[in-house]
Amino acid sequence: MKPSGAAISLGFDALVSSAAASPVQLEQRAATVKGFDISSYQPNVDFHKAYADGARFVIIKATEGTTYTDKTFSEHYTGATEAKLIRGAYHFAHPGQNQASAEADFFVKNGGGWSGDGITLPGMVDLESEKGHPQCWGLSHSSMVAWIRDFADTYREKTTRWPMLYTNPSWWSSCTGNSQAFKDTCPLVLARYAGSPGAIPGGWRAQTIWQDSDKSPWGGDSDVFNGDLARLKKLATGCRGSGVGCVDHVCQSDSKGVANEKHCTIYAIWFTECSKGE
């Protein structure tokens, strides 16, 4: 991912998979779906070719901080929709520079919202360092975790969905102290440019999306969804209205037809929010 003023993509941190404290080996499902992420650095994208080549989703930069909107977002979003790609938006975070709730609100108001139409992914917040700013944006571990929590809670309140968190092992370990605060709520988008996802921080059992390269054949960065197309669509749709007390997740009912968290199956690590029934 690229901040508005950067000339290169994610940077060295994304290449490092071994820096996290007590990493957990990822569970990579056999079935995966190809996708990519883009910003104004890729002004001309052939979305129809991407679909023809096998891509099925794209994540598009919408906002940064509380004032920047990506000038190509609307065109990209329309093009992706017309090509029948599942699409979503992302926000480049400036922790410590602004209130998290203000950034989440700005994101939602400028393309980062969610609707249960089956083709809109929950929004993603891009958490990484930026040249010209202090390491970890000058925040302590606890302050960074609190900032991310405020962003996630605000986004959830406004959209009913938890945002996806984009990060890499080195940044997460250095800037949050390897926090496990989000492993059961926010889907993980893991940045690691290597032949396999490797290990992740923060207690997540698996990545939802793996950014495996900064060179996608369709422009931008290459992404891999950790599941089949049906599960990707489920991530986009959520399970509101299913009648089993679930959001963001597929749950199995017990013998009495009651959804219970003990019967929830984690599909590509989107998240358990199952009630014990009514």
Image (cartoon, rainbow, N blue to C red):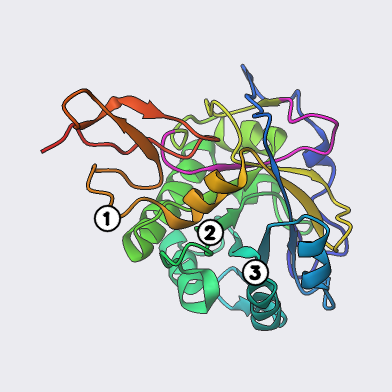
Q: Secondary structure at mark 2?
A: loop
**Image spot of residue 250 (x, y percent):** 39, 39
In the image, residue 101 lies at what x, y percent? 41, 63
Give the residue number, with chain letter if any, for mark 2.
121
Magenta segment, which residues? 184-198
Q: Nearer the viewer, residue 153 or 267?
A: 267
How would you rate the neighbour count of disc 2 (Cα within 10 Å): few for under 14, some for 14-19, many for 20 or more? many
According to the image, label 3 marks what residue? 84
Residue 13 vs residue 102: left or right?
right
Residue 157 appears in the figure = yes
| Element class at badge 1 | loop
Indicate the amino acid at tag 2. Leu
Real-space Cα separation, disc 1 to disc 3, in angstroms:
24 Å
Q: Mark 1 or mark 2: which comes first in sequence?
A: 2
* Above/below status of 98 relative to 181: below
**What residue type is disc 1 on?**
Gly
Magenta region, mostly helix, strand or loop?
Answer: loop
For mark 3, give the secondary structure: loop
Q: Sequence order check: which comes first, mark 1 or mark 3?
A: 3
147 up-or-down from 17: above or below: below
